[in-house]
Structures are given as C-alpha cells and as structure tokens.
Image: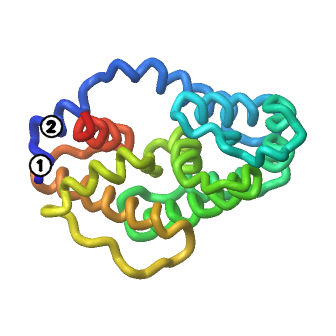
C-alpha cells in the first residue's frame, strides 16, 4: 500500500494544470453564491456538472419529452429555486472544517443536495452534489467520485475504518468524508502539512495516474 509521503503531499500542493479551469468555477460560485435567479443556477449546474463529468441530465429518463435545454430550464432551475439550498449552504459556510460538528454538517448538507439532485434527475447524484458543494464551500467539502474512493483505499494502512453510525445524510459520502478527514489529519500530524480539500483531491488523483 502506498503511504502519503511528504513528497507526495508537497506535489499535490503544487500548482496544477487544472488550476485555471477550477478557478473559473470557483469564481463563478463566488460571483453567484445564492440561488435566486435561473440564469446563475443554470450556469453553475451546467458548468460544474459537465467539466467534472457529472452532468445532472446524464442517463435521465428516456421517456422525458423535454430536450436537454428544456430539461434544464423547465425542471432543473425551478426545482433548485424552490428548494432551501441557500439555507443549507449557509450552514456549511459557518461550519468549522476538520471538527466533529463540521463533519456532521458536511454530511448532512451533502445528503440534502444529493436528495434534491436525485429528485430532479431520478438518478443517484452523490458525486455531482459533492462537486457542486465544493465549489460553493471549498474549505469544507471533499470531492467524491469513483476515482477518489478507489485511491483513498490505498491508504487503508494508516486510516481508521469508517464508523458504522449512518447518521443524517448519504452513507457512502459519510464514509468517504470520514476517511478523507482522517487522511488530512494524518498528513498534518505526520508532516506538518495541512491540505485543503482541493489538495487532497489532487493527491488522490495522483494515485490513479
């Protein structure tokens, strides 16, 4: 099993070829932090979903009469406008990362957004929810997808097992978030290097190369 060595961590903390693309998404969510207008909602859901291969329309009901554009305009934007997503994100913004309460808030808010996106698409949107929330609250939310789950298993020798308590939220994301938090804490205590969720994602992506 590979270990999170100091050299690996420092490499993950270095500038990446994807930084400019990610900065565009961070800036988009900074410029449009709330969900008050369809245009801002559509831009964020569309760009984050497609750049990160987690588009909300993927494999949606083939019997849906709307074409893709109408689906976004008639279903995606109105559903998000009617939701309490801004209240959920505000709760996440005031949470303290890497604390038990912060982890609990992260999992709860992710679960709510996953359910919202699931109601919109009739599909499991755990990955999209994590990515969407990450760009709104980058200091709190870890990015979840099949590659990150596979990579974090490589560090099982230095990570505790996820707890069995399901709590409130999506259980798979909870387990991943617990392990991600433990890995960040391990790297800080072992090497004095504090990784952000973005830098952790860079580290996990390097494992898959």
Quadrant in the rendering for residue 54: top right
Residue highlighted by disc 2: 8
| Residue 132 percent coordinates (x, y) | 58, 43
Compare marks 1 and 2 and give the one earlier in the sequence.
1
Q: Residues within 10 Å of mark 2 (few under 14, many from 20)?
A: some
Q: Which mark is residue 28?
A: none
Q: Position of residue 174 (x, y in %)?
A: 44, 66
Front residue of 163/27: it is 163
Say if residue 87 shows up in the picture: no
Is residue 88 shown above or below 2?
A: below
Q: What's the CA distance linking mark 1 and mark 2?
A: 10 Å
Q: Position of residue 20 (x, y in %)?
A: 44, 18
| Contact flag, marks 1 and 2 (Cβ < 8 Å) | yes
Q: Along the line of sight, which residue is nearer the eye, 119 or 44? A: 119
Does residue 137 appear in the picture of this structure? yes
The answer to whether 18 is drawn above or below residue 192 in the figure is: above
Which structural element holds mark 2? Answer: helix
**SS at badge 1:** loop
- Mark 1, Cα crowd under 10 Å, few <14 / some 14-19 / many 20+, is few
Q: Count the numbered circles shown.
A: 2
Q: Residue at point 14% right, 47% down?
A: 4
Which quarter shows the C terminus? top left
Judged by depth in the image, the label closer to the viewer, 1 or 2, is 1
Q: Position of residue 136 (x, y in %)?
A: 57, 41
Seen from the viewer's position, the closer of residues 52 and 97 is: 52
* Vertical placement of residue 113 versus 67, above or below: below
Residue at the front extreme, as displayed: 63
Residue at 60 percent across and 52 percent down: it is: 125
| Residue matched to label 1 | 2
Task: Name the residue nearer the viewer: 141 or 102.
Answer: 141
Residue found 47% across the figure and 26% down from its top:
22
Q: Is residue 165 left or right of residue 200?
A: right
């Amino acid at each position: 099993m590979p270990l999170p060595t100091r050299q690996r961590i420092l490499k993950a903390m270095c500038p990446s070829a994807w930084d400019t693309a990610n900065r565009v998404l961070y800036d988009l969510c900074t410029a449009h932090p709330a969900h008050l207008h369809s245009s801002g909602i559509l831009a964020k859901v569309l760009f984050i979903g497609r750049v990160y291969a987690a588009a909300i329309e993927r494999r949606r009901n083939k019997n849906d009469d709307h074409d893709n554009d109408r689906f976004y305009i008639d279903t995606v934007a109105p559903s998000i406008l009617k939701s309490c997503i801004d209240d959920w994100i505000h709760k996440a913004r005031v949470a303290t990362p890497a604390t038990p309460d912060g982890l609990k808030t992260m999992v709860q808010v992710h679960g709510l957004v996953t359910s919202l996106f699931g109601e919109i698409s009739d599909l499991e949107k755990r990955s999209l929810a994590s990515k969407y929330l990450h760009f709104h609250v980058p200091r709190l939310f870890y990015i979840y997808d099949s590659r990150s789950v596979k990579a974090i298993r490589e560090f099982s020798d230095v990570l505790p097992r996820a707890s069995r308590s399901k709590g409130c939220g999506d259980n798979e994301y909870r387990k991943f978030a617990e392990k991600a938090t433990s890995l960040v804490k391990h790297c800080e205590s072992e090497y004095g290097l504090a990784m952000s969720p973005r830098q952790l994602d860079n580290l996990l992506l390097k494992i898959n190369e």
